Image (tube, helix red, strand yellow):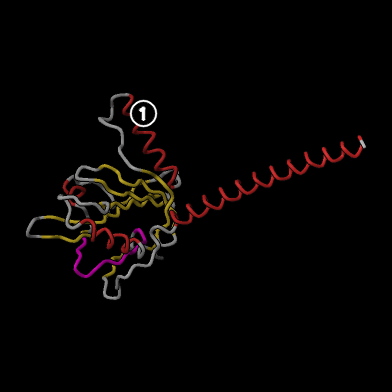
Amino acid sequence: MRLYSGNKKGLSQITAIIILLLIIGIIVVGGYYLLDNKNKKINTLYNVNKPINISNWQIYKNEEYKFSAKYPSDWKQETTPRFYKENKLPGFGGIIIYKEQTSQGLRYGLSISLEENPQSLSAKQWVEKIIEDNKMSYMKNEAPYLLDYKSTSEVKINGYFGYAIFGLNDLEGRVDRLYLSRENKIFVFTYPIAEVNPNYFDPIENNKIALEILTTFKFIK
């Protein structure tokens, strides 16, 4: 009787361990599933289908740096931003694709600019370096303030993986700034976020257009 009782106790302990392992397994698998879904949502954030007809959109092509993007026919584009031109900076300053409300002198625009990337850093490494350099400069009193932003994460722009700083506090309001690494260049996309802001022309509606423009961006041969 004692031997039988001991076996029964041992079986109960083994059963308890198995149940515990199963529970841990469910938690781990469930956590991975949720995280994976979250990452998929982030990765496809800029590759969604929107009810916007782009059949009559114009195409901007840059043969030197091998990229193109489409934009609405009632939007304009400047191949060299005014600040870049006025300061006579060398190389490609970028373009700004924008919609303008001339009566109030307001704009909403998506800028695409390039920065040299001699170390061929990934987009994530580039963003991490920006944030770390800012912190170090602030600690040395070389920067007037720490970067103010809402979050950073991986994104996918029309199939290209990049990294973003969301809700970055810029001079006139918060913007999203996206980075793509391509060979020894960093492509930088900047546009105001979708929130009411008197400094921009209809930012909530035009933000949707900016996101759609991003889905048309591609590298060309």
Q: Which residues are magenta?
A: 65-77
Of all residues, the one furthest to the top in this rendering is 140
**Residue 11 falls within the magenta-colored stretch:** no
Side of 107 relative to 54 (left or right): left
Q: Residue at x 65, y 47 (%)?
A: 25
Image: 53 above or below 30: below
Q: Residue at x 22, y 45 (%)?
A: 173
Image: 58 above or below 67: below
Frontmost residue, 208 versus 64:
208
Q: Residue at x 37, y 50 (%)?
A: 179
* Residue 112 image-quadrant placement: bottom left
Of all residues, the one furthest to the left in this rendering is 103
Of all residues, the one furthest to the bottom in this rendering is 55
Frontmost residue, 13 versus 157:
13
Q: Residue at x 33, y 25 (%)?
A: 139
Frontmost residue, 95 versus 86:
95
Label 1, residues with CA under 10 Å away: few <14, some 14-19, many ≥20: few
Frontmost residue, 1 versus 221:
1
Report the residue marked by disc 1. Answer: 136
Of all residues, the one furthest to the front in this rendering is 1
Locate the C terminus and report the quarter of the image it occupies. Answer: bottom left
